[in-house]
Amino acid sequence: MNRASLRDIHVKALMLLMAAMAGPAASAEVIVNAAQPQASISRAFLRGMFGMRLRAWPDGTPVRVYVLGDDDPLHVEFSTEVLQTYPYQLRQNWDRLVYSGTGQPPIQVGSAEDLLRRVAETPGAIGYAGGVRPAALSGKVKVLNVR
Amino acid sequence: MGSLRCWGIGLAALGLAGTAVAGPGEDVQIHGFVSQGFVLSEGNNVNGSSTDSSGSAKYQELGINGSWRPRGDLMLAAQFASVRAGEATDEYLTLEYGLLDYTPWQAENGRFGLRAGKVKLPFGFYNESRDAVFTRPGILMPQGIYLETSGAREFGYFSVYGGQFYADWYAGNHALYLEAGAYGDQSLGDSADIAILRADAKGTFRNDRGFLVRLLEDYDGGRFRAALSWATVDLSYTPSGEPFSGSNPFAMPGKLDFRQTILSFQYNWPRLSLTAEYTWRNFKLDDLIPGLSSSVADLEPSGAYLQATYRATPKWSGFLRYDEQIRDSSDRDGRKAEARFGLPRYYQFAHDWTVGTRYDLTSNLAAWAEFHYVDGVAWVNPLDNPDFNAGAAERYWNLATVMIGYRF
């Protein structure tokens, strides 16, 4: 085994180790307050809610949208993979609503834990989560399938 | 004095921002913006005496808004703004919008509702939120579509009292948004004559009625967007009562019809956005200036721009834009107007090449810079250029402008 291939193995091992430390790629999921009756949601409805246009659930409960900052990796993943749009477009859309008097922006929180807690505590709340969730909140939020 | 005033309000707003951030109710929200621009130009003035070696800082925008959503189907919202843009616009504090929004129906596949009060005018991609630089495609709006430096604010181009119906329809990857508004009798401000006649008429204009529709399609979460906007406005002019003279040529009452159609297209990639908008307008002036034949008095202005915006990083973007404004599309090079009115033909068009950049220092604070090279003076403001109507404007000119803005 020559020196170059040995170095290759070292590099590959290091990459594997780094991947293991980072954990499985956080997969963004839609979460809602557990009191919401539905088990799934259409992407169009989801876009309407995160676009801050649909402001009430079918039963009339006001929708409360919680998000992370524009450059948070979970927000980026949720925007691109689940909503299938770009964070900059969400931001442009919210700014347009706020400064034209036609809507309110979502509530921005500082961390994924905070987002989870706010969705658990707030009737009508919707947000997103990735990775492991604390067991204490298991009955208070639920994951919606996106149709 | 103006800048002192504006910054005074600015500091007050920043103080308020602190309280808004400290405890925002989720149903009551307070937001706002403040921005300060600086313009340095060669040839013609824009937003103040920008050809002076020290440039012009008479370019300030400030707004504060509040909204309250007591129920899922109701919202009350209002915004006050203070805007200084050279000699044309100097609003101490005006109500930009103040409205009640009721959404009787909203479901998985759409919604409809009504807004009433003072509402922003939705046309093109950018008009309704243009007061906040954060929502604009650059510091200066593309002048081909979004009239600005010719007293357009007072012309009721920004917001008016009236009612608006809106409906959204969602199906698969399509989202279709309709807005239709009707606007009643209201006065236009002091600078409306500049916007309409390019001259300081002594009488007053009123907006008798207006109607505006915009149909906008967001395809695949906004990857592709297209819009059709159409507006018609009937204006009337009441003379001051002074007799006709060289300094008071508008001594007769009259009417003026204004129509505008805009087509808008945008395609968005992760980093690149391409935007194009095209407009054609029609001014029927023949009832305003008695004795003029309609071939002289009816103008068909047009405008268009194409912009490519590249986001190198989420914080840093740059753009390149070509923007043109034509005062009469049957006289694109201005020769007919030159023969009739004696003003240089380049008063009838403006071709503007712009390169610009935006840097977001934080999520609330951003800085902009752009450079314009312009052929023609169609949107140069006579109020900022006292010799303009004597034919003294420069045909080829350029301007650099920078702006810093804060929002909350």
Image: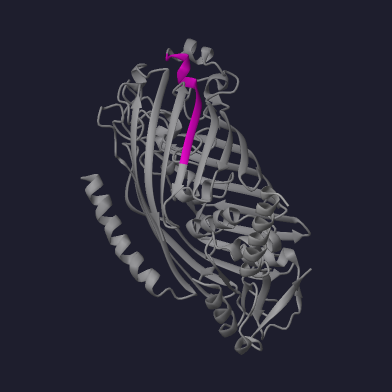
- In the image, B171 versus B163, the foreground residue is B171
Q: Quadrant of residue B21?
A: bottom left
All told, the count of numbered labels is: 0
| Magenta-drawn stretch contains B381 | no
Q: Position of residue B266 (x, y in %)?
A: 65, 42
- Where, quadrant-wise, is the C terminus of chain B in this rendering? bottom left
- In the image, B19 versus B182, the foreground residue is B19
- In the image, B395 versus B243, the foreground residue is B395
Q: Quadrant of residue B301?
A: top right
Going 46% across and 26% down the picture, which residue do you hit?
B289
Residue B63 visible to the viewer: yes
Residue B112 visible to the viewer: no
Q: What sort of colour scheme is used for the picture?
A: one colour
Query: Can you name the residue that lies furthest to the front here?
Result: A1
Q: Where is residue B308 in the image (x, y as percent from the top left)?
A: 59, 37
Task: Say whether residue B121 is left or right of residue B132.
Answer: right
Above or below, B215 against B56 in this view is below
Going 57% across and 82% down the picture, which residue do you hit?
A122
Above or below, A107 against B279 in this view is below
- Where, quadrant-wise, is the N terminus of chain B in this rendering? top left
Q: Where is residue B322 in the image (x, y as percent from the top left)?
A: 55, 29
The magenta span reads B343-357
Going 54% across and 16% down the picture, which residue do you hit?
B333
Above or below, A93 against B204 in this view is below
| Magenta portion: prevailing SS class | strand
